[in-house]
């Protein structure tokens, strides 16, 4: 009887947090949002909308979209950082699965093949690589080949035409978990039907996102079925 009474008291003082009431960082403190929503975990197409608000607790208002986007060739899967939002049977991201990691992330610096006057812009020059080698301390970072040496596996970004314009996604990952790396927003080239795990858009839309994200923005990638699990998304 005492155990039951204590349990009831704990439940009253510390009520369980419903999944739909979750408002995780970095979304909770964001004032700009890029929301990418797919019909399910297996589709390679999604809808992208931009939102903004005046304060972290304010109401979201539409700032652009919806527009069409390509995502992972095999769809999406929950990142390790957001697998608490997953339900039984939903996929979890791993290296090489051709899925974009579902979750919420800060949008990082803009990049491209040509020079730019944008603040914090990264020009992809010969030797610029994004390391996807789980044995390297530079895993999931953009660095020069000269710094990591010839044996470390990485994507030669300056040779990828899809990276004509882009934005880095600040994707938190750990090499030991082999949970994916080098996630970007980049240009969708004609004929492409999906990405290796990124968001791809028409070039003009990528440039618009570079403008939108410059003061700081977050990216939310979710299937429709999970929208109700995050309370602070736009209604």
Image (cartoon, rainbow, N blue to C red):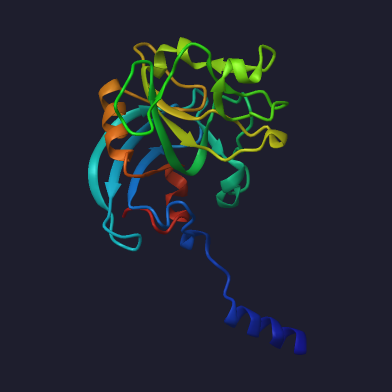
Hey, which quadrant is residue 9 in on the image? bottom right
- What quarter of the picture does the N terminus occupy? bottom right
Image coords of residue 172 (percent x, y)? 57, 40
Image coords of residue 161 (percent x, y)? 40, 12
Q: Residue at x 57, y 75 (%)?
A: 15
45 vs 208, nearest the viewer: 208
- In the image, taking residue 235 as reference, residue 224 lies left or right, namely right
Image coords of residue 55 (percent x, y)? 30, 60
Q: Residue at x 52, y 64 (%)?
A: 18
Number of numbered callouts drawn: 0
Vertical comparison of 28 with 5: above or below: above
Vertical comparison of 52 with 56: above or below: above
Q: Residue at x 76, y 89 (%)?
A: 2
- In the image, taking residue 86 as reference, residue 26 lies left or right, namely left
Whether residue 89 can be seen here: yes
Vertical comparison of 191 with 43: above or below: above
- In the image, taking residue 174 as reference, residue 196 lies left or right, namely left
Whether residue 1 can be seen here: no
Image coords of residue 228 (percent x, y)? 43, 54
- What quarter of the picture does the C terminus occupy? bottom left
30 vs 119, nearest the viewer: 119
């Amino acid at each position: 009887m005492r155990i039951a009474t204590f349990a009831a008291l704990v439940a009253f003082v510390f009520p369980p947090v419903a999944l739909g009431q979750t408002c995780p960082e970095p979304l909770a403190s964001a004032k700009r949002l890029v929301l990418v929503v797919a019909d399910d975990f297996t589709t390679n197409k999604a809808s992208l909308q931009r939102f903004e608000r005046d304060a972290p607790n304010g109401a979201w208002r539409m700032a652009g979209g919806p527009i069409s986007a390509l995502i992972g060739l095999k769809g999406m899967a929950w990142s390790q950082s957001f697998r608490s939002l997953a339900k039984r049977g939903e996929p979890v991201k791993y290296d090489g699965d051709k899925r974009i990691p579902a979750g919420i992330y800060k949008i990082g610096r803009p990049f491209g093949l040509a020079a730019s006057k944008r603040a914090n812009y990264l020009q992809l020059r010969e030797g610029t690589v994004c390391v996807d080698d789980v044995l390297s301390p530079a895993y999931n970072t953009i660095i020069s080949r000269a710094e990591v040496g010839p044996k470390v596996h990485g994507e030669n970004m300056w040779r990828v035409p899809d990276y004509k314009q882009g934005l880095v996604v600040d994707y938190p990952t750990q090499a030991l978990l082999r949970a994916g790396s080098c996630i970007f927003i980049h240009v969708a080239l004609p004929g492409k039907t999906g990405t290796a795990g990124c968001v791809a858009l028409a070039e003009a839309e990528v440039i618009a996102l570079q403008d939108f994200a410059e003061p700081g923005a977050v990216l939310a990638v979710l299937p429709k079925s999970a929208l109700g699990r995050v309370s602070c998304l736009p209604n």
